[in-house]
Amino acid sequence: MMDSPSGSRVPYSFIWSKNMAKMIRSTRNVQKKRALVNQRLYFEMNLYAQFRDYFYPQFALKLPANPDLKQKADIQLGYLNTFLDGETYVAGEHLTIADISLLASITTMDVAGMDLDRHPNVIRWYEHCKKIVPGYDENLEGALAYMKFYN
């Protein structure tokens, strides 16, 4: 029970049922947004794995570039480009942890020389996020320092 503004006692179930439809809609929306953010985070793991498989043998082992592995990484960038078609951020209209995580990966890919030119939505998003994500400059410094290690 809870006291109402008029001083009478109101059961919590009444308050809950009164707002239930609104709460359910809101919860559904939150769940959908959370699921989309999670999907984009899982996508980012695969994107980075494809890039890693292409990039690291060249730099760590000094092996020649494998065009098949480059194509796999480029296909993943194509998916990201599609996700960003008509969107400001990777999981909707607001910056999320998925954008920040992907920004770190795309920065590494860019610094390593991965060609992003075929993916205009990725470039647009990347340029936007570089300006607004707190701490981006620190991440960039780290990526550049990492590349110096391999060069």
Image (tube, rainbow, N blue to C red):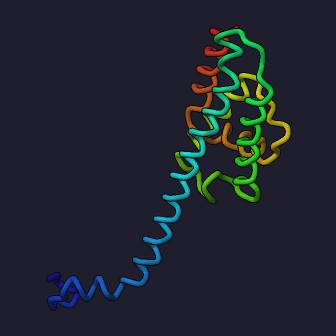
Q: Position of residue 49 (x, y in %)?
A: 61, 32
45 w.r.t. 107: above or below: below
Q: Residue at x 77, y 30 (%)?
A: 68
Residue situated furthest right in the rendering: 118
Q: Residue at x 62, y 34 (%)?
A: 48
Q: Position of residue 146 (x, y in %)?
A: 61, 15
Q: Position of residue 31 (x, y in %)?
A: 46, 65
Q: Residue at x 77, y 23 (%)?
A: 66
Q: Residue at x 34, y 88 (%)?
A: 18
Residue 39 located left or right of residue 57: left
Total labels: the figure holds 0
141 w.r.t. 22: above or below: above
Which sits in the foreground, 85 or 7?
A: 85
80 w.r.t. 59: above or below: below
Q: Quadrant of the N terminus?
A: bottom left
Q: Quadrant of residue 77?
A: top right
Q: Quadrant of the C terminus?
A: top right
Q: Quadrant of residue 11?
A: bottom left
Which sits in the foreground, 8 or 11?
A: 11
